[in-house]
Amino acid sequence: MKEESLDPKRQTLIAALYGELDAEALEQFQASLEEDPLLRAEWEELREARALLETAALNEPAHTPEFVFIDRSQATAKPKRRLFGRPLFSPAWGFASVAACLAILMGAGLRMDRMDNSLVLRFGPAPVPKTVATPSQSVTPSETTPQFNPPVPVGGGVRVETTAEKAVTRDDLNRYSTRMLDALTQMMGDAQERQRRDMSYLMGRFYEEMADEQDRKYESLRQRVDGIGLGLMSEQTRTSQQISRLTDQVRGTASPADSVATPRNPDKDKKP
Amino acid sequence: MDDRLQGLQDAELVVLARDGHVDAFNCLAGRWEPSIFRFTRRMLGDTEDARDVSQEALVKAYLNLQKLREPARFKAWAHHIALNLCRDRQRSRKHRQPSETYVEGEPGELHVVEGGRSFGSPESDAHRSGLTGLVEEVLALLPQEQRAAILLREYHGFTAEEIGAMTDVPAATVRTRIYYGLRAARRQLKERGVTEAGLR
C-alpha cells in the first residue's frame, strides 16, 4: 500500500487531535479550522473516530498480569558447594580447618617449646620450673639459664625440676591421625548430607514447576477448545439462520431486501 | 515480590535487573505486560496468540536487557519488541495460508485481510459482540502499519516521534498513517451503523 504524505495542514491536524500543539500553534490551527470548511469536516471525522475507539476500549475485558520470570539458569545450575553460607573450599575455610586441627591437638596436650634455637613439639603438661633456693646460696644472674635447658644443680644450689617430657612417638601420631581422620570423615558426611538435602529440594522445585507448567498448558488448551466450540456453535447458528432466510425467500414469505445477507465489505469487490 | 521495587522507576528497575535481580524484572513485566498484551491482541486479533507473543516479548526483553541503551525507555522498547514479534507472527500466518485477499484502492481504503485469518472467524476473538468487537474488527482490516500507529498512539500513549523511532520512519509518516487509518476506520464503522451520535 502506498500512503500519500500529508500536507502540513493535515500534519498539524493530527498533532492537534492528540494535543501535541503548544498554545500558539493551537490558536493558529483553530483559526485555520474556521477558515477552511473541508479541514473542519476532516477534524470532526477524525475526532469522532477517536471518540469511538476510546469508547470501545472502555468495554474491553481487563487483563491480569501473569508473567513471572523464573531465572532457570540459576534455578537449574549446579549449586556451588557451600558450608555455613561460605564456599566449601575457600581460603577462609582452609584457615578455619587448620585452626580447628591445632585446637584439637593442643587440647590433647600438644605443646610447642623452644629448645636450642629450634621448636620442639611435645605432649604432656608444660614444665613448671620449681626453684628452691637455700638461704646459704643465692642464685647469681649468670647462673640463670633458660627454662627448658637447666644446668645440672651442683651441690644443692639451684635445683630445677622439670616435668617428665617425652618426644612424639609413632603411636601418638597414629592416635592423632585417627582423630583427624574421624573429624574429616564427620565433616565429609555432613557435607554430603547437606548436598543430598539441596538436591532433594531442587528436585522438589523442579517437579512442582513441571506440574504447574502442565496445569497451565492444560488450562490454556481447554480454553482454546472451549473458544473453538463456542465459535463453531455461533457459526452454526448463523448458518442455520441464513438457511431459514433463504428458504423463506424461496417460498416467497420474506421480502428480498432482508433475505440476502449484505456483504461485509462491499469496497472489497470494487475494481480499481 | 519486594514491595519496595514497586516504587522504583523503570530505569532503576532495569539497572537492578541487569545486575541479575530477577524480581526487578518481574516488577517491570508486571507493570507493562497488560499493555503489551492488549497491544498484541489488537494487532493479532487472537487472545492465545497475543498471550504467546507478549510473553515471548518479555522473555526477549529480559535476555537482551544489556542492549537497552536508555533504561528509561523500557516501555517503548518492550512494545517495539512486541510489534516486531507480531509482524513475524503475521508473516508466518501468511506463509501458512497463502490464499490472502488483497484489494487495491485509494490510500486509506481497506487493503488486506491479514494472514488469511479474517476477524470474526471462530479462531479469532473478534466475534465478541458490541462496539469493542466491531472496533477490533475494523482495526484488523487496516494495513498493519496504520493499525500499529493508531494502536500505539491511541491506546498506549506513545507520541508520533516515539512510534517513528520504533518503526524506523519519520514522525510525519506516523501522522500520515494515523490520518488515513482513522479515516478508514471511521468510514467502516459508519458503514456498520456505528456513529458517535448513535452511542448517545
Image (cartoon, rainbow, N blue to C red):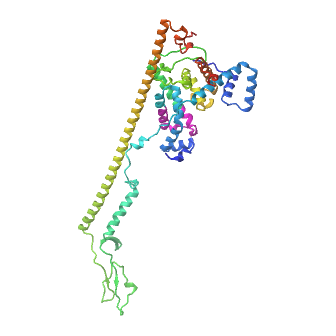
**Residue that appears at 57% across and 43% down:** B9
Quadrant of the image containing the C terminus of chain A: top right
Q: Is residue A142 magenta?
A: no
Magenta stretch in the rendered image: B54-79
Pick whichever, B169 or B151, lies toward us: B151
- The single residue placed furthest to the bottom in the displayed view is A136
Residue B165: image quadrant is top right
Residue B199, position in %: x, y? 62, 24
**Residue that appears at 51% across and 28% down:** B41
Q: Would residue A264 appear left or right of B171 to someone viewing this image? A: left
Quadrant of the image containing the N terminus of chain A: top right
Residue B143, position in %: x, y? 56, 21
> In this view of the protein, can residue B174 be seen by the observer?
no
Residue B14, position in %: x, y? 53, 41
- The single residue placed furthest to the left in the displayed view is A171
Q: Is residue B10 above or below residue B48?
A: below
Q: Is residue B49 above or below residue A103?
A: above
Pick whichever, A40 or B199, lies toward us: B199
- The single residue placed furthest to the front in the displayed view is A253
**Residue that appears at 31% across and 75% down:** A125
**Residue that appears at 74% across and 20% down:** A36
Pick whichever, A190 or A119, lies toward us: A190
